[in-house]
Amino acid sequence: MQQRQLGPFSVSAIGLGCMNICHAYGSPISEQDAARLLLAALDAGVTHFDTAALYGMGVSETLVGKYLSKHRAQFTLASKCGMSGVPNEQGVKVRVIDGRPATIKATCEEALGRLQTDVIDLYYLHRWDKKIPIEDSVGALADLVREGKIRCIGLSEVSAATLRRAHAVHTIAALQTEYSLWSRNPEIAVLKACRELGVSFVAFSPVARGFLCGTPLDVTAFDAKDIRRAMPRFSPENYAKNQALLPPYHAIAAELGCTPTQLALAWLLHQGPDILPILGTRSADHLRDGLGAMQVQLSASVLAQLDALINQRTVHGDRYNAQANSEVDTEVF
């Protein structure tokens, strides 16, 4: 298994994002299927598992802890705080962004219990709570490092400027944000800042939330809870336009003898040795397919073809809707 550096850890070049086992894209899979996926990833050589307090309102962390804790020495564990499920007046858990130091520390304690571990290797601030100075939130994470509850600090969906401010408080090991052929925001400034500071870059949604997987999506049939329903790129109007990008994309994959999923991941791996994609999936077969991307070599001419075909100018629709956009730090992305 090809290895890459994630902060101080050497991990598989492609990791497993553990959101899909309980959250985001329709109804959750069964616990048995989630267990099979997690163990299949470990058996395949995946050593980077990424979860969060938010995913399934704690369910993802619980499943990772239940089925992987006995193998804890075999992988690097990443999770996230600063955005989680909080009961409303009706007792229903709703998503809340809260970067106060006390909340971060309480979330970590809860996560350690769910994950059945004494220490989390890489702990991200899932979203910067703009009501709280980033220095205060990172300061709380630094306290957790000193207490031995986490080993390294990460940030998710922040700008280059915010990364620099945070890094001045405590070393940031990794920055995570969406990056794929159709989401190029990190190329504006964040990748450059990460490289200057020695921060690893973790790319989530590397196959464009299923768009680049090869299996046609019916956006009108998404589950009521599928988060893509609120994403402009998946509106029926925009998606119809975006579909025009797929036949030439699939043709490139066919010419190379790889799958569309592998092509998307291979493109990311070719963007630099410091890029670590995490593949979110519910299927062990899809995971194994994705891991094959490490064997796909792309020439400069193919990379140029892909860059020209799918990019921020050819994709229709914003990455997030107005509400979600207000929650990410994109001022100097």
Image (cartoon, rainbow, N blue to C red):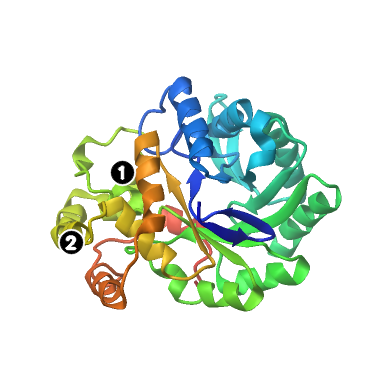
**Residue type, mark 2 in image:** Glu
Examine the rendered structure and indicate whether residue 291 appears above or below residue 106.
below
Of 200 and 318, nearer the camera is 200
Relative image position of residue 128 (x, y in whole percent): 61, 57
Relative image position of residue 145 (x, y in whole percent): 80, 52
Among the two numbered marks 2 and 1 on one chain, the one whose residue lies closer to the N terminus: 1
Which label number is shown at residue 29?
Answer: none
Relative image position of residue 108 (x, y in whole percent): 72, 41
Of 225 and 245, nearer the camera is 245
Quarter of the image where one finds residue 130: bottom right
Name the residue at 57% across, 24% down.
91
Mark 2 falls on what kind of element?
Answer: helix
Residue where numbered disc 1 is placed: 229
Name the residue at 43% across, 22% down.
30
Examine the rendered structure and indicate whether residue 22 appears above or below residue 132.
above
Residue 276: in sight, yes or no? yes
Give the tally of numbered discs. 2
Residue where numbered disc 2 is placed: 255
Examine the rendered structure and indicate whether residue 152 appears above or below residue 161.
above
Of 320 and 247, nearer the camera is 247
Mark 1 falls on what kind of element?
Answer: helix
